[in-house]
Image (spheres, rainbow, N blue to C red):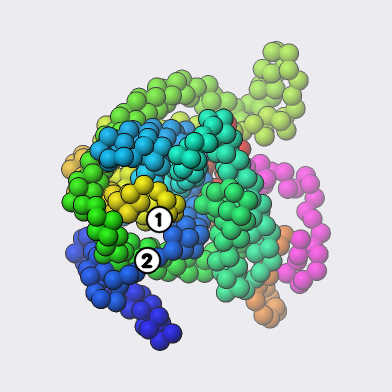
């Protein structure tokens, strides 16, 4: 017991120390933690260190993916969903098939099915490893694509792994594989969606920030464990619960609860990420010992890992290049709608313009009310913001190169490899190959991605981006001040105790129910707020800030 506690204390100290040293030396902390773990694996106490892969797949990854999904801007996820879906499904399948053929050729007596199984293990990018790119001044579109891909591609890889193992047992069915994948995703989405809604419903009644944060720690496990028990993807369920919580949290949770969540979850992320990479390094000697015990060569396995890593980069580059061309074509097609949407937006700013829009619909044989036209306004505003977002942050060859190089493998690759059945041909060699690919990807790509960002960033682009973000923050603050000036002041004369909760619109300062203002007197103010909110959403798109997270108005519907 004392040895276990001492080990955990030492691990926490190592995580803290490597984080500080990494920032001081300009080296990504995950790389240092893997190096420390590899060095520690040669100590006698870690000769037989093996971590149950279930601890990674169900104990560490769900909270990490949940936290990343909560903090990911929902608007960015929606805008880049096409690219994210392609990278999460088609690229994973294509990489697994290419690697399956490669492994079948270079590893003796390994069939295509087992090669695809190992390819599925190696193909997904890791959300924890991808966090390295977030520390560099790279385009927010690149970060959104990489983060969204790493959140969703695990489900594709794990389902493909199960399918390949079944195929190796001569029970493969294409439509059965498609049905298994659909079942795993759909059930996970339903469970994650329900847990996300339940999370918002329950925690909105927990006013104590400490209790609220403790409840948030249970959400990823409550989503992942039932999904896994039903044969679905627990990681996808945790991600969906996180996305729903991230979208609805700013409207449901108080500012004090959100601050408590953010501070505590940052600590949890630091600890879990550090432990993932430490455990990854500590298993090196055990993996090598298993390979030697099986009378297989370590050096050939590492050469195979190097070739597989290079192939993953080549396949990824071959997929990203046409993807960027399709995204550019789609952006040009959507840009043609901009003049028409701008005209509609201008008309919606005045009552006379609203009447003209109603008349225009009438001329086309459609009878609509002015209320219907007003409800159409947020969709127009969102459409304009999307168009300007794509115009001002295009994805060129520089961004494409970063998307290719920043797709790193990590702990999930090693954890998935250790789930291979015991009767897998040359199982120890396959695990070492997966470990080698993950380490090469993490060290090789992770240590050079910052330099690559510096080389590919045009001169003055970073300063221009920082200046634009400062202007956007100043613009948002001005909108908040103007909106606050419109809200009636709360009468506090002669009152003792804390101010009333302003979110409770049905309560008066004295605690009783207040009488609603006459409808006629509320209309001018509501119209003024509605127009100002629409202008704020359309004007604050440049910095990539998620308008869904502000208190300036309800979330816009999709265009």
Quadrant the N terminus occupies: bottom left
Residue 373 belongs to magenta span: no
Residue 509 belongs to magenta span: yes
Q: In 3D space, how far apart are the residues under numbered discs 1 and 2 (Cα atoms)?
A: 10 Å
- Residue ID at (57%, 61%): 221
Quadrant the C terminus occupies: top right
Q: Is residue 145 left or right of residue 215?
A: left
- Residue ID at (32%, 33%): 101
x and y, in percent, of residue 525 in the image: 67, 47
The disc placed on residue 305 is none
- Residue ID at (61%, 40%): 183
Q: Residues within 10 Å of mark 2 (few under 14, many from 20)?
A: some
- Element type at mark 1: loop
Asked if residue 283 is positioned above or below residue 134 in the image, the reply reads: below
- Asked whether 318 or 376 is in front, the reply is 318
C-beta proximity under 8 Å, tags 1 and 2: yes
Q: Is residue 399 left or right of residue 1?
A: left
Residue 492 seen by the camera:
yes
The magenta span reads: 506-530
User: Going from the N terminus, do you reach mark 1 or mark 2 first?
Assistant: 2
- Residue ID at (73%, 48%): 522
Q: Which quadrant would residue 503 be assigned to in this image? A: bottom right
x and y, in percent, of residue 478 in the image: 47, 52
- Asked whether 61 or 341 is in front, the reply is 61
Q: Which residue is mark 2?
A: 50
x and y, in percent, of residue 62 in the image: 50, 58
Residue 281 seen by the camera:
no
Q: Residues within 10 Å of mark 1 (few under 14, many from 20)?
A: many
x and y, in percent, of residue 353 in the image: 63, 26
Please, which residue is most extreme toward the bottom here? 2
- Element type at mark 2: loop
Q: Which residue is mark 1?
A: 418
């Amino acid at each position: 017991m004392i040895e276990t506690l001492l080990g955990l204390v030492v691990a926490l100290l190592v995580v803290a120390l490597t984080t500080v040293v990494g920032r001081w030396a300009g080296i990504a902390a995950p790389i240092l933690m893997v190096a420390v773990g590899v060095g520690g694996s040669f100590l006698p106490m870690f000769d037989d260190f093996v971590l149950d892969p279930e601890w990674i797949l169900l104990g560490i990854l769900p909270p990490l993916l949940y936290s990343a999904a909560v903090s990911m801007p929902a608007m960015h996820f929606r805008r880049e969903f096409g690219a994210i879906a392609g990278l999460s499904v088609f690229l994973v399948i294509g990489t697994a098939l290419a690697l399956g053929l490669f492994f079948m050729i270079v590893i003796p007596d390994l069939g295509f099915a087992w090669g695809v199984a190992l390819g599925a293990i190696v193909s997904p990018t890791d959300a924890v490893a991808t966090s390295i790119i977030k520390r560099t001044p790279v385009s927010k579109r690149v970060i959104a694509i990489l983060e969204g891909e790493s959140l969703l591609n695990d489900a594709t890889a794990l389902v493909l792994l199960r399918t390949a193992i079944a195929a190796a047992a001569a029970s493969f069915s294409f439509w059965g594989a498609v049905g298994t994948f659909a079942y795993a995703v759909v059930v996970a989405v339903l469970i994650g969606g329900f847990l996300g809604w339940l999370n918002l419903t329950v925690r909105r009644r927990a006013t104590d920030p400490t209790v609220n944060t403790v409840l948030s720690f249970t959400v990823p496990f409550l989503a992942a464990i039932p999904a896994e028990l039903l044969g679905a993807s627990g990681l996808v369920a945790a991600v969906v619960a996180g996305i729903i919580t991230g979208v609805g949290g700013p409207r449901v949770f108080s500012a004090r609860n959100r601050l408590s969540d953010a501070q505590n979850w940052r600590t949890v992320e630091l600890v879990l990420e550090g432990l993932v990479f430490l455990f990854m390094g500590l298993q090196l000697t055990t993996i090598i010992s298993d390979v030697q015990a099986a009378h297989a060569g370590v050096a050939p396995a590492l050469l195979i890992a190097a070739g597989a890593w290079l192939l993953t980069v080549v396949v990824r580059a071959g997929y990203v290049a046409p993807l960027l061309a399709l995204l550019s074509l789609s952006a040009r097609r959507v840009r043609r709608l901009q003049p028409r949407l701008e005209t509609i937006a201008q008309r919606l700013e005045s009552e006379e313009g609203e009447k003209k829009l109603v008349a225009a619909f009438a001329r086309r044989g459609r009878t609509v009310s002015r209320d219907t036209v007003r409800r159409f306004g947020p969709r127009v505003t969102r459409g304009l913001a999307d168009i300007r977002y794509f115009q001002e942050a295009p994805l060129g060859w520089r961004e494409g190169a970063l998307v290719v190089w920043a797709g790193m493998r990590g702990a999930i690759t090693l954890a998935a490899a250790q789930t291979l059945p015991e009767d897998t041909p040359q199982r120890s060699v396959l695990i070492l190959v997966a470990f080698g690919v993950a380490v090469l990807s993490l060290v090789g790509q992770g240590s050079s991605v910052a330099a690559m960002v510096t080389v590919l960033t045009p001169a003055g682009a970073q300063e221009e981006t920082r200046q634009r973000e400062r202007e956007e923050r100043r613009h948002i603050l001005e909108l908040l001040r103007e909106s606050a000036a419109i809200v009636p002041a709360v009468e506090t004369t002669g009152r003792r105790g804390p101010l009333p909760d302003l979110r409770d619109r049905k309560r008066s300062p004295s605690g009783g129910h207040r009488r609603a203002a006459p409808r006629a007197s509320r209309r001018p103010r509501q119209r003024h707020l509605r127009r100002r909110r629409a202008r704020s959403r359309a004007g604050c798109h440049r910095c990539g800030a998620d308008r869904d997270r502000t208190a300036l108005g309800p979330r816009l519907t999709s265009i």
